[in-house]
Image: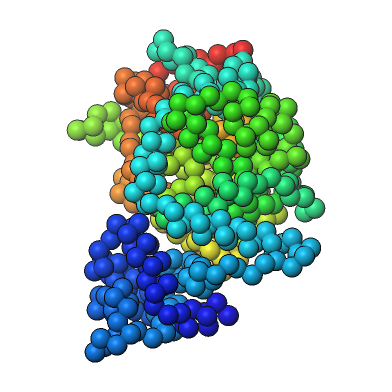
Amino acid sequence: MVESALCQLRVPRYRTVLEQKIRERRMTLEEFAEYAETFARERGEPGTLSVRHLKRLMAGKGPNGRPLGPLRPATARLLERIFEISADELLGRPGEQPHTGDRERGGTDEAKRLVIERGLSMSKTDLADRQVRRSRVGRSRVADALAEYYGAEDELYQVRSAGSVVRTSVCTRADWLDLSCSPAGVHLRLAHDAGEPESSDAEAAAERLADAKALHVRLVEAPLYRLLDVEVNRGSVSGVVGLTSFMNYALSADLLEAELVDQLTAGGPTQQGSLPMRDRDLPDLEAVHELNERLCAGGVLALCAIARPADPYRGPADYALLVQERSDQVVNAARRLSVIPKGFHQPLVDASGETSIGATLLREMEEELFGRGDVDGTAGPHRAAAPMHPSRLSEPMRWLADGPDRLRMECTGFGFNLVSGNYEFASLIVIEDDEFWARYGGQVEANWETGGMRIYSSLDKELITQLISDESWCNEGLFAFLQGVRRLREIGGKRVDLPAVEVLRG
C-alpha cells in the first residue's frame, strides 16, 4: 500500500524532502547518487539513481523540459527505503488515525511519527559531535555521579593500586568477588513464563532509533537473557533468567546511560530528581536488586591473557593482555576501553541450553577474536542447529579444545552496573600453552565491535599501572580488568609482574 502510494507521488513534495535529507547528510548530488547506488546494490533493491535522474528530480523537469510526472516505481521504493519515510510524510498529509481502543496500532503510529520527526530534524554532523562529547566524559565522573545519586559509596567496587584509589559504577559485595569458580560452577535456569516489565520513554526511544539509523549503530530484534533471581557464593553461582529482546533493552534500560552522560556533558545536576528516566525506572538500590520488577540484561566479559614464548626483541616469556577500544557502532560503551571478549549474555538458537556463562564466553571468543561472523548475535536469524559444534569451530578454538590444559576460564566477580542496571559476570581467560601464540597469534583479530586493539605485556608493571587510571575505560570493562589482574597475579608465576590491586571494603 505504501509502495503503491509512493509510485504516484508528484515531484514538488518529494523534492522538498529530498533536498532536506541531502542537505542534512552534507552530500553533493554526485555523492548522494553514489550512496544510493551502493545502497541498492548491497540490499538487492531494483532501483538505481543516476546523477542525471537525480538532477531532474531536484529541478522538477523531465526530458525536453517537460514537467516530471509520477516517480518511477523502482526509484520511489529505493528512496523510501533509504530514508525510511512513508508516503503520507512525503505527501504532507497526516497519517491515518488509530481506531478507538486500538492501543497497539496507536502506539505504533505514534512511534513511527516520533522517529520520522527526529530523523527529519537531526544533523549527522551534530550527532557525531555529540558522540565525541559523550566519549570525553571520564569513567570516574560517571562513577562519582552514580555514587552521589544512590548514596552508594560503600557498595561500589573500588580499589587502591600504586597509591591511587579507583572507583567504578559496579555495585558488588565482598562475597561476590574472587569467586574462584569455573563457568561450569555458574548454574542459570531458564524460566519460560517470565513476564516483560513495562518501562519506556517514547521520545527517548524514538531518538535512539533515529540516531542509530544515522550513525549505523546495530540494533536488532535478537533474544537476550534478563536476570530474575541470583545467589552468589564463593565457588558457585545460581540463578534464574528469562527472555527479552535486544531491542526492548536498547529502547528502555540502556537509555539511562545516555540520559546520565548527556546531563554530565551539559554540566547539569545528577542527584535524585534531576534524571527523569532514572528516577522512574532505577531510583534507588532497592530497585536495583528487585530483579523481577525491571529489565536486568547481562554482560559477560573477560580479561584475555595469552601466553607468549620468550622473544629476542620483546623479552622474556609473558602473557599478552588484550584490551579493546570499542567502536562507534556498538550500543553501549562506544569509544571506551574494555576487555575483550565483551558481549551480552544471550542465546543464538537454544534458549534453554545456552544459559551457561561459559557458552557465552566461548562464543564471544570465536566471534570477537577468531573471526566467526556466523555466531554474531547481531547477524540476524541463525540457521545452524549447533553453531558451537566441534565440527564448526575455528582452527584456533579447535586447537584449544583438543588439549585439556590449554585453556583456563574463571569467573572472577559479579555485580550490577548502575549505569544501566546490567548484571556483569567478570571473568578471566588464560591460554596457558605458549605454542598457541606461535601457531595462531597472527589470526587473533577483533570484529566490528572493536575500533582498535591494544596489547599489554604482563611484565610491564608501569604501563599497566598507567592503564588502570585511564579515564577512557567503561566501568564494567575496568571491573573485569582489575579482577583479572588480581587473579593473574596469583597464578601467573614468572610470566607476570603486575601491580598490586587492593579491593577497598566499605
Q: Position of residue 258 (x, y in %)?
A: 51, 39
Q: Position of residue 271 (x, y in %)?
A: 59, 23
Frontmost residue, 479 versus 388: 479
The reply to whether residue 12 is visible in this rendering is: yes
Q: Residue at x 40, y 41 (%)?
A: 130
Question: Relative to 412, is 36 above or below?
Answer: below
Frontmost residue, 404 versus 488: 488
Question: Residue 281 falls in which quadrant of the image?
Answer: top right
The quadrant of the rendering that contains the C terminus is top right
Q: Position of residue 292 (x, y in %)?
A: 76, 40
Say whether residue 305 is left or right of residue 281: left
Q: Residue at x 61, y 50 (%)?
A: 202
Frontmost residue, 212 versus 484: 212
Q: Position of residue 275 (x, y in %)?
A: 59, 31
Say whether residue 144 is left or right of residue 163: right
Say whether residue 375 is left or right of residue 468: right
